Amino acid sequence: MNSFGQKLKFSTFGESHGVAIGCLLDGVPAGLCIDETYIQNELDRRKPGKTEFETARKEEDKVEILSGVFEGKSTGTPIAMVIYNTNQKSKDYSNIKDVFRPGHADFTYFYKYGIRDYRGGGRSSARETAARVAAGAIAKLMLKELNIEVLSGICEVDGIKSEQLDYEAAKKSVIYALDAGKEQEQKDAIIRAKNDHDSVGGVSRVLVKGAPKGLGQPLYYKLDAILADAMMGINAVKAVEIGDGVLSASVKGSQNNDAIRTNGFVTNHSGGILGGISNGEDIVMNVYFKPTPSIFKEQKTVTTKNEEVDFSLKGRHDPCVAIRGTIVCEAMAALVIADMLLLNMGSYMEGVLKYYK
Ligand SMILES: Cc1cc2nc3c(=O)[nH]c(=O)nc-3n(C[C@H](O)[C@H](O)[C@H](O)COP(=O)(O)O)c2cc1C
Ligand SMILES: C=C(O[C@@H]1CC(C(=O)O)=C[C@@H](OP(=O)(O)O)[C@H]1O)C(=O)O
């Protein structure tokens, strides 16, 4: 179960090499138009196997809505969605049955549960994030009704930073690069690492446009805390910055404060959140992904019997997980913002009236 979930309850099921993955999304208001083509398009943006910058595992990620939608509209009842796995090739994973891949969840799952679905990491595989994207697409449909948009793109690969942040460019790029001028260099870094049987990290920049003032509950349900929680819950995310983030610790207050004018804020160092509440500016986050743990270089590890071994991995893996990860960030951000909106409708007379009008 998700940890935001005040109004929207969201959970997923399934394993990478099981029959299917899917989700249950409860709390979506009745009467929302559920555009299945839109949901599928969102899944297509994340699905694996599209380019050489992604895992070679080809999945169509066709989503099927099982409940909660009638004649194209949400009914206010739980929405269940399923995506069948079709390209498992589980036998490729027999060589990690008794060894732990450094950097992956094999070690910790084994010591926590004593049993591990080693076929592609089972439940710990980011295959599960397809289900997040399906739920996030429904949240995005709800946000669209309120002219709120969630966008994202890659602003750094292997330390190569984007100078431009062009979200339209990111939509056209196969690696969702925000800076078309840096795209080739970033692509080259991914392919170089891949050819070297290695992997690279990257950073996704997420932008929520059009969010109203007042989202987030002080003090223990702050919008920045909940967004960070949602992002950190994505596989391989190691840090989240809101607005200027880490940089704000090394500048003066006079440089960091956003001056206020009658028409809004002059700058947006805060990333659109003050005191845990949205201030009406763009909500901006940087989400940091580590390099893919499953690499094909020989590595040192131990077996399930705690014997030291050198081992070489097989399988199909993303050389840079941030690329597809950015689509998952959008989905999680959309779910959080939708949840916060629904929460405000309950605590704000204006919201309640608008909702019931
Ligand atoms: C979209 C996406 C794709 C990923 N693809 C792979 C992959 O192909 N191989 C791999 O080892 N890890 C991949 N990961 C990362 C692992 O799932 C993740 O590192 C692992 O579950 C351990 O969790 P942690 O890194 O959060 O500790 C991917 C992550 C995301 C978000
Ligand atoms: C299958 C997908 O990505 C997978 C994420 C992943 C991992 O360890 O996170 C490992 C690889 O697959 P497997 O679980 O078969 O080893 C990726 O291909 C997907 O995103 O749909």
Image (cartoon, grey):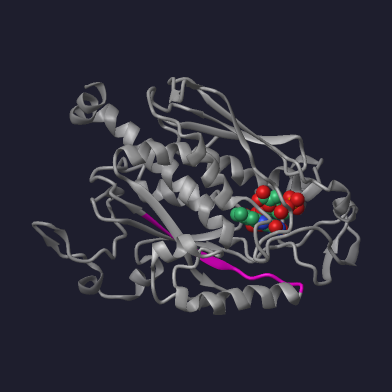
Say if 150 sits above or below 26 in the image.
below
| Residue nearest the viewer, comparing 111 with 87 | 87
In which quadrant is the C terminus drawn? top left
**Can residue 187 be seen here?**
yes
- Horizontal arrangement in the rendering, residue 338 relative to residue 93 (left or right): left
Say if 164 sits above or below 275 in the image.
below
Give the residue displayed 80% in from the left and 68% down from the top. 296
Give the residue displayed 55% in from the left and 48% down from the top. 233
| Residue nearest the viewer, comparing 30 with 49 | 49
**Can residue 229 be seen here?**
no
Say if 259 sits above or below 66 in the image.
below
| Residue nearest the viewer, comparing 85 with 299 | 85
Q: Position of residue 177 (x, y in %)?
A: 49, 68
Q: Magenta part of the protein: which range? A: 197-207
Give the residue displayed 73% in from the left and 40% down from the top. 85
Q: Position of residue 266 (x, y in %)?
A: 18, 65
Is residue 133 within the magenta segment? no
Toward which corner of the image does residue 262 lie, by quadrant? bottom left
